[in-house]
Image (spheres, rainbow, N blue to C red):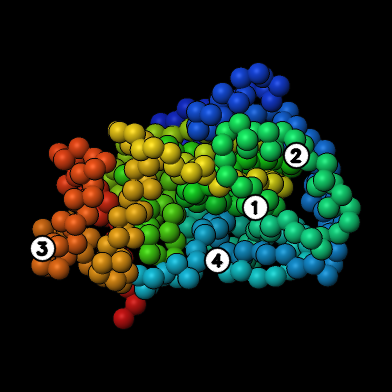
Amino acid sequence: MDEHSMACVPPFPCQPVQRISFDDPAVIDFLRREEPVILSNVSLVRPLVGKWNVDYLKENFPNDFLFTVFTSESNFFQYWDEEKNAGQYEYTPPTSKIQMNFHDFVETIRRPQGPSLPGSTPMSQSHAGRRHYLQQMLVTGMGERILDDFKHVDWGTVYGWKAQLGFGDLTTNLLLVGTTGHVTPAHYDEQHNFFCQLQGRKQVMLFSPAEWGKMYPFPLHHACDRQSMVDVFRMGWPTLDNNGNYFGQMPSHDRMLFPNFDRASGYEAIVHPGEMLYIPSYWWHHVINLEETVSLTFWFKCPPVGDLRLPISQVQRVALRRNIENMFGSMLGNRNVQGLMLNLLHGALTPEQTRAVEEVKKLLRHVLPPEEISAFLQELASNRFNLPVRM
């Protein structure tokens, strides 16, 4: 099968993520760069590849264990958390969360689905029945055979890399099980991720932290924090016409809302069973299931920040943007950050808002050249805050 069979053709410039062998002596040097890389024939999950497929898991997970399953009316599974919605933004939750045992989950996802709406985007695509995507942390109680399998992961390599890279604690192993066409839209995480593929292929589009201004993340105090407001493909599933050509294009109204995305460039990875994709913290990633898939993640906290060196890195710039939004929330109240940002764009700050902005500018002078500060704040506010709020 061609590697790109069923894959989306990116409507933006991109280059392939480099693929190297796990046995290559330069592996640790690649990981130290904090850039995406695919490791083939990786030892981390070698005992699980070809074994932990959907049928094996269905046979060995106990029926009394309930898994976290997200459901959606479309192929789009965007993350959200109402507890983060301190800005009281009005929104429709893009997914619902339910509990199911694994047997019922498999029966559900393998039930015939209705056809997608031709020419629609994943965000708006509708089907006969809801789509289901299992996302479950590995914990005790999942059955003796599963836990015994998990013990045979190459933990020596996992913790050896952790020590050499200076990562913080391993926080989570997340099991992901989904079907063809499921999309996890563009977002970034604040931890490093060793993303291991056990069954099926996934297409992952990645964007550097330097592309932040082109990705239009939801506000920090929104339920969809860390998610991009841009649907990076603007198309339905499948995404190719009969000649294998990309047929979607960003609608004109979205080009007006998110004009900088036209200049975005990214990286593409097709991750096969037995491979690991390293997704560094703060790298945007948009993930598409090309077939029925099983994946396992290893999440690590970022190492503590050492002495600050100027100029600050692109990763530090993303963290700085988050800190600024937090500071404005602390000074004016989280619900009032939106008003400040909109007034900042229109040059109509109130006296209280002006004092808050001047206070932030004083701090920014320690890490940014003075001539960059105004543009930095304008970019922070641009086209991100004109969202409905709850009355």
Can you tell which quarter of the image residue 60 is in?
Answer: bottom right
x then y, percent, for residue 300 = 59, 45
For the C terminus, which image quadrant? bottom left
Label 4, label 2: how far apart the Cα atoms are:
34 Å
Closer to the chain start, of discs 3 and 2, is 2
Residue 95: image tag: 4
Local SS, label 2: helix
**Place of residue 306 in the rendered image (x, y in percent of width and height, measured from the top left):** 43, 39
Does any portion of residue 267 appear in the rendered image? yes
Viewer-nearest of discs 4 and 2? 2
Q: Which residue is mark 1?
A: 172
Q: Check disc 2 and report the residue beneath it.
A: 155
Spatial separation of the CA atoms under disc 4 and disc 3? 37 Å
> Label for residue 348?
3
Residue 236 visible in the shown view: no
Q: Quadrant of residue 197?
A: top right
**Considering the image in quadrants, where does the N terminus appear?**
top right
